[in-house]
Every structure is written in structure tokens, then in C-alpha cells.
Amino acid sequence: MLNIVWPIFIIISFSFAIFSGNLENLNNSIFESTKEAVNLSISLLGTLCLWSGIMEIASKTTLTEKLTKLLKPILKFLFPNLKNPKIHKEISMNMIANILGLGNAATPLGLKAMDSMQKENKKKDTLSDSMMMFIVVNTASIQIIPTTVIAIRNSLGSTSPTSIIFPTWVATIIAAIFGIFVAKILIKFTKGDKS
């Protein structure tokens, strides 16, 4: 669908620029926006490399085991059917990456956890309860340090790039609580439906 929508937008924009005599402004904005996109990408790349490196180092140490133990009560509540400690470790690393605001670093960790859960899933064509809950938790992604947003705000010249921290806490915590609550109710409802 997007491969149809975007070309239409581009054609309309170019046509409007030609007929309104703003072709030079369009041309200037294209070069300016590409320059800004490259600067933003470089800024985000540095932040992403730093935190991805820290996560990689953490995964090679006993720190991950300690963090998994710390998150164990939460994991037990969210994923009561998961007994495999390897999956708990993968989910913990994903949650920690999300908490640090590293959505891009959390993605491969989340895919790894999802793959491990799928291997244990008895119905291969249907998501397990644990997989659905993981999607909810991952989508809400509680963030203590919204690194990516801070880097974007900083690259765009914000005078206070870290002022987003408190609103991010509020939004992500409310989203996580509501998402988990609804998921737990729906899981319980579907279990009752099946019996």
C-alpha cells in the first residue's frame, strides 16, 4: 500500500511546485532535508553504537544473570507459562534495552526471544499467551532514558533535550500498565472460552 501512497504524494508535491512556481523552493528543501537526515543519522548512530556496545558487554558478563534475577518476579507475573531460563534472559535483555531507550538495540533481542518462544510453542500457526504478552510489553516499552528521542531533540537544536524524560515515564508506564491489564483479561477470557 505504501508503495502506492508515497509515489502519489511525491507526484502531487512536484506537480504543485511546478504549477505554483515553487520548484526552486522544493529543490532547496530536498537538499536541506537530505543534509539534516544525514546529520541526524550520524548523531543517532553514535548513541546507538555506544549503548549497543554496552549491552553486548553486559551480555558477556554475569550482569545479565543478575538483571534477570532482578526482573524474575516481573517475568513470572507476565509470563507464567515460560520456564526456560534462556528465554527469560533474552526477554530481560530486551526489556533492559527498552528501559534504556534503545529501541533499535532492543529489536534484535526481541526477535531472538520471540524465535525462542516460537520453538517452544505447540501451535506453530498461533501466538502463545507468552508471545502476545511479550508483544504488549515490547510495544509499551517503559523507558527510563529515552536515548533516541533525546538524541533527535539534541540534533535539532533543542535548548532542553532531556525535558522529555518525565513525560516519557508517564506515557510509557501508563501504556504498559493498561496493555498488561487488558492482555491479562483477554488471556483469562480466552482460556475460559476454551474450557
Image (tube, rainbow, N blue to C red):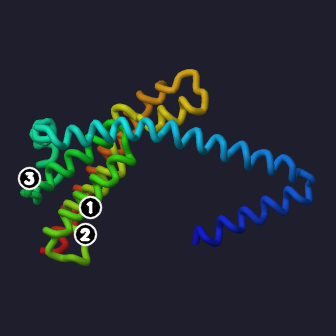
Q: Residues within 10 Å of mark 3 (few under 14, many from 20)?
A: few
Real-space CA distance between mark 2 and mark 3, rounded to the nearest whole angstrom: 20 Å
Which residue occupies 73% across, 49% down? 30
Q: Amino acid at mark 2?
A: Leu
User: Which of disc 3 and disc 2 is earlier in sequence?
Assistant: 3
Dots 2, 3 in contact, CB < 8 A: no
Residue drawn 19% across the image and 60% down it: 130
Q: Quadrant of residue 189?
A: bottom left
How far separated are the C-alphas under marks 3 and 1?
Answer: 19 Å
Q: Is residue 111 above or below residue 152?
A: below
For residue 185, say whether it is visible.
no
**Secondary structure beneath label 2:** loop
Rendered location of residue 41, percent (x, y): 53, 43
Is 94 rendered above or below residue 3? above
Say which residue label 2 marks.
127
| Residue in the foreground of this view, choosing between 135 and 179 | 135
Q: Residue furthest top?
A: 159
Q: Which residue is mark 1?
A: 132
How far apart are labels 1 and 2 at the CA level? 6 Å
The label nearer to you, 3 versus 1, is 3
Residue 139 in the image: x percent, y percent? Answer: 36, 51
- Which disc is residue 85 wearing? 3
Q: Nearer the viewer, residue 182 or 59?
A: 59
